[in-house]
Amino acid sequence: MKQRNFNDDFKKTVVDLYHSGSSVKDLSSEYGVSEVTIYKWIKHFTPIEGPQGKEITPKEIDAIQKENLRLKQELEILKKAMAIFARK
C-alpha cells in the first residue's frame, strides 16, 4: 500500500473537525485516513495550556526540545574551544 503524505494544514483541519464534534470513524471514512493516524494527529495538534496561559502543541514541544539539545551541544563545543584558546 502506498504511503501518502498530508500537509500540516490538512491535518489541522481534520483535528479541528474532530474538536467540533465529528467522530474519528466519520472523518476516517470521509477523508480516507486510518483512525489510528487521525488519533496521532489529534495528539500532535491538540494544544495544551502552557506558561502564562499560552497554548502549545506536543509537536511544538518536541521542536523546542530538539532546539534545546542542539544549543546545549553548541555550548559544549564553545566551552571546549575556550579552554583550548585559554591555554595558549
Image (cartoon, rainbow, N blue to C red):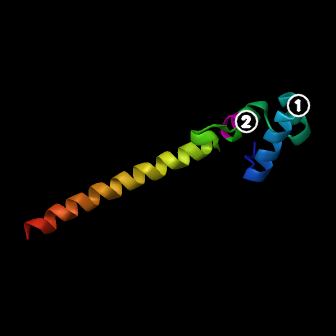
Q: Examine the rendered structure and indicate whether residue 84 appears above or below residue 42.
A: below
- Residue 57: x percent and y percent? 64, 41
- Give the x, y percent position of residue 15: 79, 39
Q: Name the image quarter holding residue 81.
A: bottom left
What are the residue bounds of the magenta stretch?
A: 40-44
Residue at (70% x, 37% y) in the render: 46
Which quadrant does the N terminus fall into? top right
Using the image, tell me which numbered label, if any, was put on residue 42: 2
Tell me which secondary structure the magenta stretch mostly adopts.
Answer: helix
Give the class, few, some or many, for how many residues have Cα within 10 Å of label 2's Cα (few <14, many ≥20): many
Secondary structure beneath label 2: helix
Q: Disc 1 designates what residue? A: 21
Q: Residue at x 35, y 52 (%)?
A: 72
Can the viewer see residue 58? Answer: no
Query: Up-down: is 26 above or below 63?
Result: above
Q: Indicate the amino acid at tag 1.
A: Gly
Name the N-terminal-most of marks 2 and 1: 1
Q: Is residue 16 left or right of residue 69?
A: right
